[in-house]
Image (cartoon, helix red, strand yellow):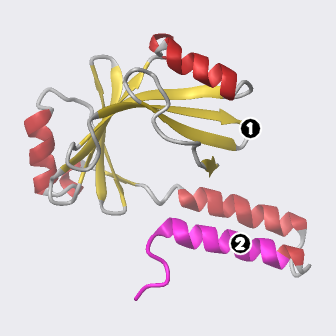
């Protein structure tokens, strides 16, 4: 059995370890900051950039079946999930597949000026000092999650949230969890 299931677990562990070393005065603040910066840079390795020839044939076939007209596709792999990133109808599109080519979900980035008023009103009232970084419409396999929904990614300094709304623009889940940068 592995202690760490994914690279992000290792980064989180090392971050906590550095904080403990700093607290018990075994390393200086300057060294602590340097190590944290190195870990952040290393965390970019977690999502692997791929060329199409590095992607499983099942994934490429499933993608080309559904998105035959897609061009300039960039591939990534995170854990066991393959992601295709491309522009479709002038919108950034991200499609996720399992290693066997089973579709997981598709997300389309929506220009902020087209954000539903109910969503912008909710964010203005409940997150007044936050900036809307990205608004997505996400469609997932109906066997796991029912259909389509909005995701608003917002931030204020180092604090980030992803908030889910139904297609009517109503809050779809209870209070979101914090995501640290």
Quarter occupied by the N terminus: bottom left
Q: Residue 133 at what x, y percent from top left?
A: 57, 28
What residue appears at the point 50 percent right and 31 percent down from the top-left corner?
A: 171
Instruction: Locate residue 99 relative to residue 9 in the image: left or right.
Output: left
Residue 37 position by quadrant: bottom right
Q: Does the CB distance between marks 1 and 2 fall below 8 Å? A: no
- Which secondary structure, mark 1? loop
Give the residues in magenta.
1-21
Q: Nearer the viewer, residue 40 or 110?
A: 110
Q: Is residue 149 magenta?
A: no
Main secondary structure of the magenta stretch: helix
Q: Is residue 3 magenta?
A: yes
Q: Nearer the viewer, residue 145 or 31?
A: 145
Residue under circle 2?
A: 16
Residue 157: numbered disc: 1
What residue appears at the point 81 percent right and 67 percent down from the top-left corner?
A: 32
């Amino acid at each position: 059995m592995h202690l760490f299931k994914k690279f992000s677990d290792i980064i989180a562990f090392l971050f906590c370890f550095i904080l403990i070393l700093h607290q018990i005065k075994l390393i200086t603040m300057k060294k602590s900051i340097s190590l944290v910066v190195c870990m952040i840079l290393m965390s970019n390795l977690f999502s692997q950039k791929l060329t199409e020839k590095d992607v499983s044939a099942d994934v490429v076939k499933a993608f080309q079946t559904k998105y035959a007209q897609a061009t300039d596709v960039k591939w990534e792999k995170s854990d066991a999930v393959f992601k295709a990133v491309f522009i479709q109808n002038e919108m950034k599109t991200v499609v996720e597949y399992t290693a066997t080519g089973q579709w997981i979900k598709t997300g389309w980035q929506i220009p902020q000026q087209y954000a539903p008023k109910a969503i912008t009103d909710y964010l203005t009232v409940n997150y007044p000092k936050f900036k809307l970084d990205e608004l997505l419409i996400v469609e997932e396999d109906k066997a796991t999650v029912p259909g389509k929904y909005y995701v608003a990614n917002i931030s204020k300094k180092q604090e980030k949230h992803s908030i889910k709304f139904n297609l009517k623009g109503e809050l779809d889940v209870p209070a979101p969890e914090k995501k640290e940068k």
